[in-house]
Amino acid sequence: MAGRYDEKEGYLNSFEQKKLLPLLGNIRGKKILDAGAGTGRLAVELAKFPGAKVTALDVSAEMLDRLKKKNQNIECVVGDAENLPFMSGSFDVVLAAFLMVHLKDPRRFFDEAYRVLKDGGIFLALLKPVKAVLLLNRFIIVRRKFARCWNRWLSALNRKFL
């Protein structure tokens, strides 16, 4: 399965149209979690930024083994995005591209992403591609300091996309 996933890289990249990573701003020296990293399509690109410390999480050891062959400097962790195996406040950025469609309970992942983000950290998610939705609406970017409206925002997101 992991080999077929790599074959779809161009297809997956076509939804982002090189607009996803620039939304993160300056990530030099930042700790970044790529949740649902698969074979590392985005993690490998993120690791190219000087000083960026990228952690790739996926439920599939096979996917992460392929990622390790691409870049041994990326920390690979087999784990569940709905129960992240990291300390609270561990990451400056949590990224999730096309992960939501694979989750049993996306709310648990959103809670976990919030938990592992540092104050002022960035959460960026790419949702399932929907042709009727404008490109910018496919991305969700939230800074952790807006925590007071997290539940209202998540409810609205659930109604619109999930």
Image: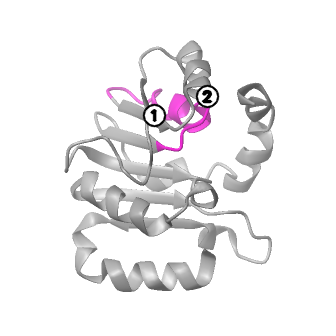
Q: Secondary structure at mark 1?
A: strand
* CA separation in Å, label 1 and label 2: 10 Å
Q: Position of residue 77 (x, y in %)?
A: 41, 30
Mark closer to the observer (1, 2): 2
Using residue 157 as the reference point, say whether residue 142 is left or right of it. left
Q: How is the image coloured?
A: one colour
Q: Which mark is residue 56?
A: 1
Q: Is residue 62 magenta?
A: no
> Vertical placement of 2 versus 124: above or below?
above
In this view, the residue in front, 134 or 57, is: 57
Q: Position of residue 131 (x, y in %)?
A: 80, 71
Q: Residue at x 61, y 63 (%)?
A: 127
Amino acid carrying label 2: it is Met
Q: Is residue 38 magenta?
A: yes
Q: Position of residue 66 (x, y in %)?
A: 62, 20
Amino acid carrying label 1: it is Ala
Specify the segment rendered in magenta: 35-51
